[in-house]
Amino acid sequence: MSQLMFDGKTVFVTGAASGIGLAAARRFAQEGADLALFDVNPAIHDVAQRIGREFGHRAIAFAGDLRSRGDVERAVAEAIAHYGAIDVMANIAAIFPVRRFEDFDEAAIADIFDVNVHGTMRMCRAAIPQMKEQGRGVIVNIASGSAFLPIEGLTAYGASKAAVVAFSRSLALELAPQIRVNIVSPGTTASPPVKQAMEARGEEAFAQFLTHIPMGRLAEPDDIAEAILFVASDRAGHITGTTLPVNGGSLMR
């Protein structure tokens, strides 16, 4: 029997109640990880129980807000106290309101950056001291194709994700060789909010949208989860400061 990639390791996943975060949490569990799951949605407690029953691994949950330093630090500290360590921090949670830039007020823009950028930074800051103490660790942060390609309606969101890329690359340099930091950059992914937005556009508009993706389909959350698992695993042991695009080839042109 082949060795599970994360057997004996603890993985902390944010945004784990749905979408990419849930898909990643399930795949980490399939590969033997014990889980600490964080989400603003209180349903995260039910998610942890279901994953624990399904895969037979420990899964604890924290309902908290990335905008709250107290929520973040409390969750990370309790996860370390419970498991003894965090081996992988997967920062997946984000918000992505779709509006033209001039339709945002300053408070809404600040909120996007508080969750997407500062929330990621808060999680990293909370996890790094213990990772350094144990002499190893992996951080995976999530970008977006909108950080590299202008997309109407995602100006503020794209800017926040570009900041995550710059932060992650510099952090990888600062933390090497003990801690690896990488970025997974999804293309348009068939999460529930995206599906609703595409359905609202109508079939013809959706078909036209797909012409810009050489693979001819949206990414599924599991597609992104597989990339997250790879860069978090020992198979990527000499990879740090790198962005892995998972977008069906949509940025080739």
Image (cartoon, grey):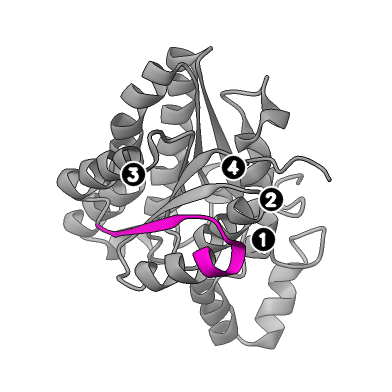
The residue wearing badge 2 is 226
Label at residue 82: 3
Q: Are marks 2 and 1 in contact (CB under 8 Å)?
A: yes
Kindly report the distance in space between the C-alpha atoms of the residues bearing marks 2 and 1.
6 Å
Q: Residue at x 73, y 30 (%)?
A: 235
Q: Nearer the viewer, mark 3 or mark 2?
A: 3
Mark 2 Cα-neighbour bin, 10 Å: few <14, some 14–19, many ≥20: some
Location of mark 1 (residue):
222
Q: Residue at x 38, y 67 (%)?
A: 44
Q: Which mark sits nearer the N-terminus, 3 or 2? A: 3
Residue 232, relative to residue 30: is it above or below? above
Residue 104 on image: x %, y %:
27, 61
Q: Is residue 146 left or right of residue 108?
A: right
Q: Nearer the viewer, residue 208 or 219?
A: 219
Q: Which mark is residue 129?
A: none
Q: Secondary structure at mark 1?
A: helix
Residue density around tag 3, few if under 14, some if 14–19, many if 20 or more, within 10 Å? few
